[in-house]
Amino acid sequence: MDRDFLRGPLGKLGSPVCRIGLSATYRPGRATVHKAPDEGLNYFFFFGIDSHMTSVLRELVPARRDQYVLATGAYNYIFAHENCAARSKSACGRPARITSTSSISSV
């Protein structure tokens, strides 16, 4: 992969990603999420409860899954810290189901 200022490999995955990603935790709105891929962004961080992001990704991802990197985290650690491995697997599974994809890159 050719390196330039705008793109670089993502960790061990090596997937080419825009150095600027988009997170839905601040509720950016559907219009912002729709515009992000048009501007070259392909790295999206979201939780299953982030409806601004999930509703748009549900439309975009199935046709072009190989072009996007979807990342999530375990948001349910806020409520309890016991059995962290099971909670993490559950938290990461919800965004995968919501976007109808089989792979989410967990960070």
Image (spheres, helix red, strand yellow):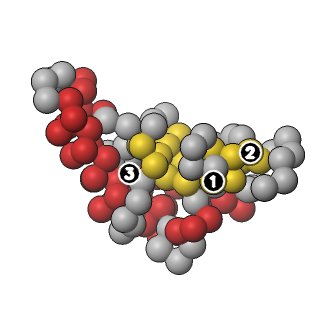
Near-viewer residue (90 or 52): 90
Name the residue: 37% across, 43% down.
47
Q: Secondary structure at mark 2?
A: strand
Location of the N terminus (image quadrant): bottom right
Label 2 neighbourhood size at 10 Å, few (<14), some (14-19), many (20+)?
Answer: some
Q: Quadrant of residue 73?
A: top left
Badge 2 is on which residue?
Answer: 8
Q: Secondary structure at mark 3?
A: helix
Three-letter amino acid code at the position of disc 2: Gly
Q: Indicate which label's residue lies in the foreground, 1 or 3.
A: 1
Three-letter amino acid code at the position of disc 3: Ser
Residue 7 x %, y %: 77, 47
Near-viewer residue (26 or 58): 58
Name the residue: 49% across, 52% down.
70
Residue 75 x %, y %: 30, 33
Residue 31 in sight from this viewpoint: no
Q: Is residue 40 toward the left or the right of residue 96 in the image?
A: right
Measured Cα–Cα span from mark 1 to mark 3 = 25 Å
Task: Decide which of tag 1 and tag 3 comes sooner along the chain.
Answer: 1
Badge 3 is on which residue?
Answer: 51
Badge 1 is on which residue?
Answer: 15
Q: Assess whether mark 3 and mark 2 are in contact (beta carbons under 8 angstroms).
A: no
Residue 76 x %, y %: 24, 32
Measured Cα–Cα span from mark 2 to mark 3 = 28 Å
Location of the C terminus (image quadrant): top left
Q: Quadrant of residue 100?
A: bottom left
Q: Secondary structure at mark 1?
A: strand
